[in-house]
């Protein structure tokens, strides 16, 4: 993997939840490229094995572990499996999370709804409940399970994944916005709680990125941007989408045993200044 810069994580063990996803897989590979042994956690061990195979092909060391971030017993079992193999854990990266499509509200403003159309008032909030669980509880529970064994380790680090919606709620996704705002708040709470215990806790807040998964949402078949994509770019002072690789440098900085040794409680935006732009 091509890294923007390299840090030395030799001898360290990293756990990446959501390690089979786009960001989680990329982060697992980056940590391994810096010398860490990486446990790739995901619900599908088969998908985890694919990430491990890529890491091993590049000369790194990794293992795939099947775990559900909403199930304490599966997390405890995965912790035991990792400790039995490598003996300790230094870094936890909480990448599990995301939006639930069924929780989205179909219009930006209530007055735009046509008669009889679904609105916020008719949404089944059970889907929002799932979204909040996935993002908040799915960050808290792994932090509780793995954070316990980080105490006393060198370069003990927890990195969470926040979002632009933590700064200002984005239209149509009230549950996801609330969930990621909760992740940001929990990150800051943990930073204080663990400050004298030797564990630093920070988060990365991704802006808008161009990936193969969301290409169809951002661009029409003729290559022109969709209205929502154009709105995003217009609201980003750097006037472009980011590349997923732009997120790697933020992670490496935050887990660096030297570069960010006095940094904790930070929500680091990687967004081309989207979160501070007011349109004027």
Image (cartoon, grey):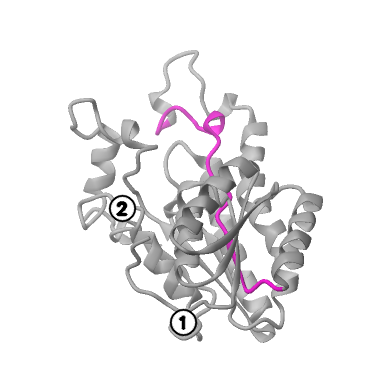
Where residue 182 appears, as percent x and y from the top left, is 59, 56
> Sequence order check: which comes first, mark 2 or mark 1?
2
Label 2's element? loop
- Are discs 2 and 1 less than 8 Å apart at CB? no
Q: Does residue 154 sit above or below 138 in this rendering?
A: below
Residue 57 rendering spot, x and y as whole percentages: 46, 56
Q: Is residue 95 magenta?
A: yes
* Local SS, label 1: loop
Q: Residue at x 72, y 65 (%)?
A: 85
Name the residue that disc number 1 marks.
260
State whether residue 197 is above or below residue 135. Answer: below
Q: Nearer the viewer, residue 187 or 30?
A: 30
Magenta region: 88-109
- Write down the residue under mark 2: 243
Decide: few, some or many residues near mark 1? Use Cα within 10 Å; few <14, some 14-19, many ≥20: few
Tell me how far mark 2 sits from mark 1, CA to CA: 23 Å
Is residue 166 at least partly visible in the picture?
Answer: no
């Amino acid at each position: 993997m091509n890294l923007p810069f390299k840090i030395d994580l030799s001898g360290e063990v990293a756990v990446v939840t959501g390690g089979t996803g786009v960001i989680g897989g990329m982060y697992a590979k980056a940590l391994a490229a810096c010398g860490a042994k990486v446990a790739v956690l995901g619900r599908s061990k088969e998908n985890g094995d694919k990430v491990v195979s890529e890491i091993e092909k590049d000369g790194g060391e990794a293992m795939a572990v099947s775990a559900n971030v909403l199930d304490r017993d599966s997390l405890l079992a995965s912790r035991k499996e990792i400790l039995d193999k490598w003996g300790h854990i230094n870094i936890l990266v909480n990448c599990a999370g995301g939006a639930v499509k069924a929780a989205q509200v179909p219009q930006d403003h209530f007055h735009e709804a046509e008669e009889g159309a679904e609105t916020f008032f008719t949404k089944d909030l059970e889907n929002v409940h799932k979204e909040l669980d996935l993002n908040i509880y799915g960050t808290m529970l792994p932090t509780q399970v793995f954070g316990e064994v980080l105490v006393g380790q060198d370069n003990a680090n927890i990195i969470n994944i926040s979002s632009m919606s933590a700064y200002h709620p984005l239209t149509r996704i009230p549950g996801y916005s609330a969930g990621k705002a909760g992740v940001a708040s929990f990150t800051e709470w943990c930073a204080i709680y663990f400050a004298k215990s030797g564990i630093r806790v920070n988060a990365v807040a991704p802006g808008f990125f161009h990936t193969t998964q969301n290409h169809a949402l951002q661009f029409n078949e003729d290559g022109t941007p969709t209205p929502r994509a154009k709105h995003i770019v217009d609201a980003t002072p750097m006037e472009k989408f980011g590349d997923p690789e732009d997120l790697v440098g933020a992670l490496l900085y935050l887990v660096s045993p030297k570069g960010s040794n006095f940094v904790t409680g930070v929500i680091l935006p990687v967004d081309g200044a989207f979160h501070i732009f007011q349109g004027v």
